[in-house]
Image: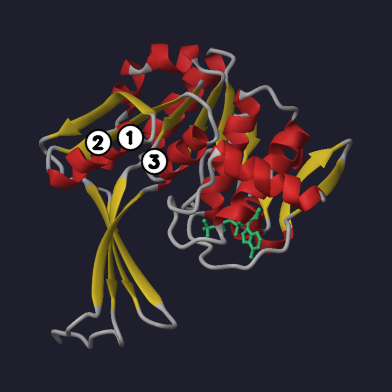
Amino acid sequence: MITVVGSLNMDLVTQVERFPKKGETLQGTSFTTIFGGKGANQAVAASRLGSEVEMMGRVGDDPFGHSYLTYLKQQNVLLSNVEPVTHFPTGTAAITVSEDDNTIVIVGGANDAMTAEEVEKGKSVIERSSVLLVQLEISQKAVEKAIRLGKESGVIVILNPAPFQAFPSHWWELVDYVTPNEHEAAALRASADFHSDFEKKLIITEGAKGASYMINGNRELVKAPVVKVEDTTGAGDTFNGALASGLDQGLPLQDAISRAVAAASLSVTALGAQTGMPDKEELQTFIKGLSL
Ligand code: ATP
């Protein structure tokens, strides 16, 4: 079983022909709401691949929050510790997209109510898990509490350091794997307290190239298949959910990474973050097709 402790956001996506000037009101061309937030995205990715997934996070007691919970139930994500809170609205990401650019404004809202004390309430859930997956869209105190509980319970702890922010160096002792993309990896390695020993915990996603990990003292690249790219949004989330799912299902690290690379590469062939996340059968068919 996988526990994901993280964010749930409603993405509010407006399409425009051009961006408004300061103070200007402009007609957009379309609007849509999409379920997002790195925590929930990764929970859905893992669940689609057949793992039992328990989500811990917070939404507001509002229409976005309620529809998110209904949706996650439909995705077979268990919600024993996702409570609607009344003092914050559901987290939102207001995304404006033009043909060649976008802007994103995130309001954490209820995600900020996922405090260390609230994580502690889910201690027994973490203890029952085989894998714990966390990102950096909730407070560092909450993340630290989760990874400490994970470490104490002997759970495999994966930290996806996104969106990037520096974190305390003692976290490296509490986690088994850290999964940055190339930019995040460069930022981690550039930090003053980065130690060469940490390198063996780094599984780095490298976009169209694939993902790399350390084996016998060398960094090895698991190559991504060449695909027709439609939308890379959520590729990293699919990778992390699939990696957690592979490890949860007992795959050796190398196989779990290969499967995660395949799942993420398949996900970029469809529009939308969660829409493109494959289920187990779709992934198996895709992998079979690659080896023909
Ligand atoms: P995002 O922020 O867009 O979710 P990310 O920067 O966290 O992504 P990436 O390193 O870009 O993560 O991609 C994660 C995985 O997705 C890669 O390891 C690869 O398997 C797959 N992927 C991403 N882009 C491509 C591509 N152009 N072609 C094939 N696979 C891709």
What amino acid is at disc 3?
Ala
Circles 1 and 3 in contact, beta carbons < 8 Å = no
Label 3 CB, ligand 1: below 8 Å?
no
What amino acid is at disc 2?
Thr
Which mark is in front, 1 or 3? 1
Q: Is residue 113 visible?
A: yes
For label 2, count other residues whose C-alpha is less than 10 Å away and answer few (under 14), some (14-19) or many (20+).
Answer: few
Q: Nearer the viewer, residue 275 or 258?
A: 275
Rendering coords of residue 78 (x, y %): 36, 25
Residue 20's label in the rendered image is none
Secondary structure at badge 3 equals helix
Secondary structure at badge 2 equals helix
Label 2 CB, ligand 1: below 8 Å?
no
- Residues at marks 3 and 2, CA–CA distance in whole angstroms: 13 Å
Which mark is in front, 3 or 2? 2
Q: Kindly identify which residue carries mark 1.
A: 74
190 left or right, relative to 217: left
Circles 2 and 1 in contact, beta carbons < 8 Å = yes
Residue 40's label in the rendered image is 3
Q: Nearer the viewer, residue 103 or 283?
A: 283
Rendering coords of residue 28 (x, y %): 22, 80
Ligand 1 image position (quadrant): bottom right
